[in-house]
Image (cartoon, grey):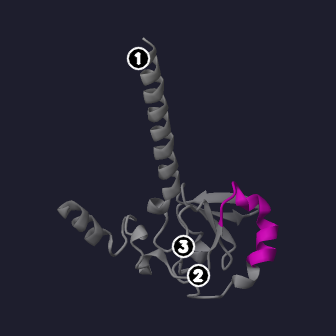
Amino acid sequence: MKKTIYTCVILCLLVVGTSANAQEQKKSVGNIAVQPLWGPTGFNTVAYYYLPDIQAYYSVDEKKFIYLEDGKWMFSENLPPAFKDFDLYSGYKVVINRPQPYLNFRAHVSRYGHFAGQKNKQVAIANSTNSKYFVITGHPKAADEQASLNKE
């Protein structure tokens, strides 16, 4: 009887340990698959980008731009009309992993404003050769990576 109880306890511990390990591995992947192609490389997890050229934010998970209009924060899937021609690929991006970064807007303008106008200083995900970005829909090598996975 004791052997059965010990065996059950050990099996339960193994199952709990394996489950916790799987969750840790899932967390380490981050949100690479939902980051936009114009985002900078090197980040497994990104909550927001601050775009100093246009003094706006982009929420990666919500896929929305956040910008001030008439003193109110606007949330939109598109850039404001004044910046519709802004090149997101060449504009500088600052990664911010804090909730509601726009509440610290003045600090971000002060701290990162000098990056405005610095074009092509960052490599965009679309131009990356790092295979960890191939999971992003629309990445130029995503189809090649999927085809090679399907062959295996």
Question: In this rendering, would 76 be left or right of 33?
Answer: right
- Picture coordinates of residue 41 (x, y %)? 52, 74
Q: Are marks 2 and 1 in contact (CB under 8 Å)?
A: no
Residue 4 bears which disc, if any? 1
Tell me the CA gap for discs 2 and 3.
16 Å
Secondary structure predominantly adopted by residues drawn in magenta: helix
- Picture coordinates of residue 94 (x, y %)? 65, 73
Element at badge 2?
Answer: loop
Question: In this rendering, would 120 be left or right of 52?
Answer: left
Classify 10 Å Cα crowding around label 3: few (below 14), some (14-19), many (20 and above).
Answer: some
Q: Is residue 111 magenta?
A: yes
User: What amino acid is found at the position of numbered circle 3 in the picture?
Assistant: Gly
Element at badge 1?
Answer: helix
Tell me the CA gap for discs 2 and 1.
64 Å
Tell me the CA gap for discs 3 and 1.
50 Å
Magenta-highlighted residues: 96-112
Q: Are marks 3 and 1 in contact (CB under 8 Å)?
A: no
Q: Is residue 55 visible?
A: yes
Residue 129, quarter of the rendered image: bottom left
Classify 10 Å Cα crowding around label 2: few (below 14), some (14-19), many (20 and above).
Answer: many
Q: Residue at x 46, y 28 (%)?
A: 10
User: What amino acid is found at the position of numbered circle 1 in the picture?
Assistant: Thr
- Picture coordinates of residue 132 (x, y %)? 42, 68
Q: Residue at x 53, y 64 (%)?
A: 44
Dividing the image into 4 quarters, which one contains the N terminus?
Answer: top left
Q: If you read the primary sequence from the N terminus, does the residue marked by circle 2 or circle 1 appear first?
A: 1
Dividing the image into 4 quarters, which one contains the C terminus?
Answer: bottom left
